[in-house]
Amino acid sequence: MDKMKIIQSDTKQTIINAVQKYTDMIVPTYGPAGKSVLIASNELSIKAADDGHAASAEIELENEFQNAVVLYIKEATEKTNSRVGDGTTTSVILTKAILDQVLLDDPFADTSYYKQVKEIQKATQEAVEFIKAKSKKIETVDELFKVAYNSYNNEKIARLIADTLFKIGSDGVLAIEDSRTAETEVEIVEGIELEKGYASPYFINADKESAVLNDQSVLLVHNKLDRFLDVVPLLKELFKDRKEFVIIADGFGEEFLGGMIMNKIQGTFSPLLIETPGFGDSKLESLKNISAVTGAKIFDPKTNKLSEATVSDMGSIKKVISKKDKSTLI
């Protein structure tokens, strides 16, 4: 099979064509008045996407070099969506606008590159300051409803979202599950969100971007776990009743992490390892908060040995959802 080749003189046009095609496919979904985009993954599967994130996930350009440009832009849009929960289409529009402005000059001239970067950084800062100055703090349930309705375009669901978010507050965590019925219901439970995700991609579900475990035992350790042998007695006890469990510790050494991954691959256990959020003494405070929610004992080499841990020392969690950069304990 012949490999495609690209030379420097074609690079500019390749970037322009890729960004233009990507923008044309995403922009129709923009805003509350946006339209749906039909996506055909094959001859028998056609679906409609009315938001930029869903449409973007399905886009793949036939030209491999143009597609490489699109993948690069997707990285930025996914980070935006992950951090704020929206903004995929806006990111694409801004990328196109920046490119159009940059191309007024020669983007490959060394003399202009530094100047362009500084101007983009300056414009970004000005835009952020302008948006902050115009922003308004959401304080009432009616204001929340307006935001939800603008995003979802369904009055009943928007009211449900607004009421729920108002009840749980700005520090609350929202987890969405598939319903077994046609109705949409809300259940408010005690939980905690950690600013740390799974310790290795080997722990995530094969068909998802996250690890999801239900009704699990959790082990808390105020120490970095290096020796896999330290938890072997506990694993033997766990093996009698269950194969899934969660370990939250200050860190994981290569030997310990490798041992857990090997057990996962072999199907012996299905563990989930999460690093304790925070730094220094704040890690212990985080563990205390988790302990209060789960009822788990905190193991610290200064006071008790992990090799003596039993199942009764572990806490319980109704559900754990762990993604790349954060985890939710319910």
Image (tube, rainbow, N blue to C red):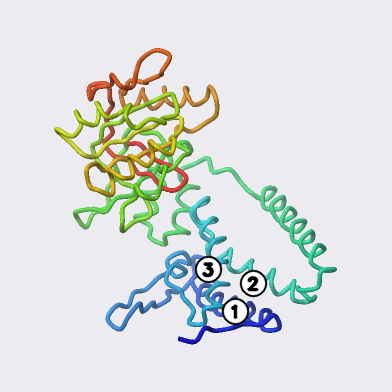
Give the structural element (helix, strand or loop) at label 3.
helix
Around disc 1, counting alpha carbons within 10 Å, would you say few (fewer than 14), some (14 to 19), or many (20 or more)? Answer: some
Residue at the spot x=32%, y=37% of the render? 188
Would you say the residues marked 3 and 2 are in contact, meaning their CB atoms lie under 8 Å apart? no
Q: Which residue is mark 1?
A: 20
The percent position of residue 17, horizontal first and vertical second, equals: 60, 81
Between residue 84 and residue 165, name the one nearer to us.
Answer: 84
* Residue 226 position by quadrant: top left
Q: Is residue 90 left or right of residue 51?
A: right
Give the structural element (helix, strand or loop) at label 1.
helix
The percent position of residue 219, horizontal first and vertical second, equals: 32, 28
Q: Which residue is mark 3?
A: 71
Q: At label 3, which amino acid type do we have? A: Leu
Q: Which residue is mark 2?
A: 96
Around disc 3, counting alpha carbons within 10 Å, would you say few (fewer than 14), some (14 to 19), or many (20 or more)? Answer: some
Q: At label 1, which amino acid type do we have? A: Gln
Indicate the quadrant containing the N terminus: top left, top right, bottom left or bottom right. Answer: bottom left
Would you say the residues marked 1 and 2 are in contact, meaning their CB atoms lie under 8 Å apart? yes
Circle 3 or circle 1, nearest the eye: 3
Residue at the spot x=47%, y=36% of the render? 171
Residue at the extreme right: 111
The percent position of residue 257, horizontal first and vertical second, equals: 39, 39
* Residue 258 position by quadrant: top left
Residue at the spot x=36%, y=22% of the render? 292
Rounded to the nearest whole Å, what is the CA distance between mark 1 and mark 2? 7 Å
Which callout, 1 or 2, points at the residue further toward the start of the chain?
A: 1
* Residue 191 position by quadrant: top left
Q: Is residue 32 above or below residue 273?
A: below
Rounded to the nearest whole Å, what is the CA distance between mark 3 and mark 2? 15 Å
Q: At label 2, which amino acid type do we have? A: Lys
Give the structural element (helix, strand or loop) at label 2.
helix
